[in-house]
Image (tube, rainbow, N blue to C red):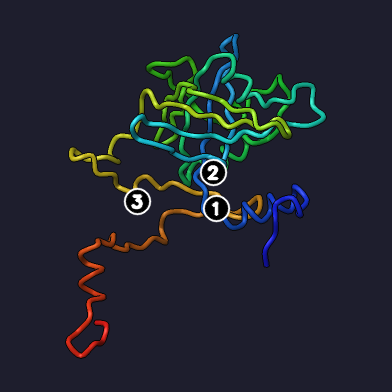
Amino acid sequence: MDWAPGDLAERDLYKLLVNTVLPRPIALVTSVDAGGRANAAPFSFFNVFSHAPPLVVLGIEGRDNAPSPLKDTMRNIRKTGSFVVNLVDRAMVEAMQICAIDFPGEIDEIEAAGLATAPSITIAAPRLAASPVQLECRETVSLSLGTRHRNLVVGEIVHLHIRDGIVDERLHVDIDKLDLVGRLHGADWYLGLGDRFQEPRQTLAGWRERTQTTPEGEVS
């Protein structure tokens, strides 16, 4: 089966993409408005983009038929030029889901989720203390994609925090202690790091050795 994107309804295209591009890392993004009020919201259209410079990318969709078409996160990034990516481990999943609720403005979703914050080193937005990895970011560029108020945000990591006991003196990360989760299909499915496997990286020399022709003309 195959389709051109224009042949599909928007919801159907979304369904196919989020049910095939799996798993997706989750950014529980904290930001502040011009008055310093903090907000937290999860995004799974997210990834690290580069290490030199260290960049992350966020895809933030707006809202139709709302007083403000931009979500609080996007509006805050535009105001302050900064945000924190808090990665989500298994223990944070329920709190992350609470932060995804479309609360009225008078309710603090961070407080509703029972999450404690910690001050960032270089930016105004707070970090979420429960997160095993927190990336302080400054907005590099944001691109408006023109439909449904979607924006692509590129942020440079200006400070990173990793929970004590996860990284050793050689900067090796203990993946089991990290215990991150990724977003899967539908609204309710997630994946931990338990089901992983190792496949050594291929080299040109190794490939040639395995595929060289034997004296009898057979491929080894």
Whether the residues at callouts 3 and 2 have beta carbons within 8 Å, the answer is no
Image location of residue 93, percent across then percent down:
54, 43
Residue at 42% from the left image edge and 25% from the top image edge? 136
Q: Viewed as shown, does residue 111 lie left or right of 139?
A: right
Image location of residue 182, percent across then percent down:
50, 49
Q: Please, what secondary structure does the residue beneath circle 2 have?
A: helix
The image quadrant that residue 118 belongs to is top left
Q: Viewed as shown, does residue 2 lie left or right of 55?
A: right
The image quadrant that residue 113 belongs to is top right
Image location of residue 110, percent across then percent down:
58, 27
Please name whichever residue, 120 or 111, is drawn nearer the observer in this view of the structure.
Answer: 120
Q: CA distance from mark 3 to mark 1?
A: 16 Å
Please name whichever residue, 83 or 97, is drawn nearer the observer in this view of the structure.
Answer: 83
Q: Earlier in the sequence, mark 3 or mark 1?
A: 3
Please name whichever residue, 31 or 132, is drawn nearer the observer in this view of the structure.
Answer: 31
The answer to whether residue 67 is above or below residue 20 is above
Quadrant in which the N terminus appears = bottom right
Q: Please, what secondary structure does the residue beneath circle 3 have?
A: helix
Q: Residues within 10 Å of mark 1 (few under 14, many from 20)?
A: some
Q: CA distance from mark 3 to mark 2?
A: 16 Å
Q: Residue furthest right?
A: 65
Residue of label 1 = 190
The amino acid type of the residue labelled 3 equals Asp
Q: Please, what secondary structure does the residue beneath circle 1 have?
A: strand
Whether the residues at callouts 1 and 2 have beta carbons within 8 Å, the answer is yes
Image location of residue 131, percent across then percent down:
44, 35
Q: Residue furthest bottom?
A: 216
Q: Residues within 10 Å of mark 2 (few under 14, many from 20)?
A: some
Residue of label 2 = 93
Q: CA distance from mark 1 to mark 2?
A: 9 Å
The amino acid type of the residue labelled 2 equals Val
Residue at 65% from the left image edge and 32% from the top image edge? 145
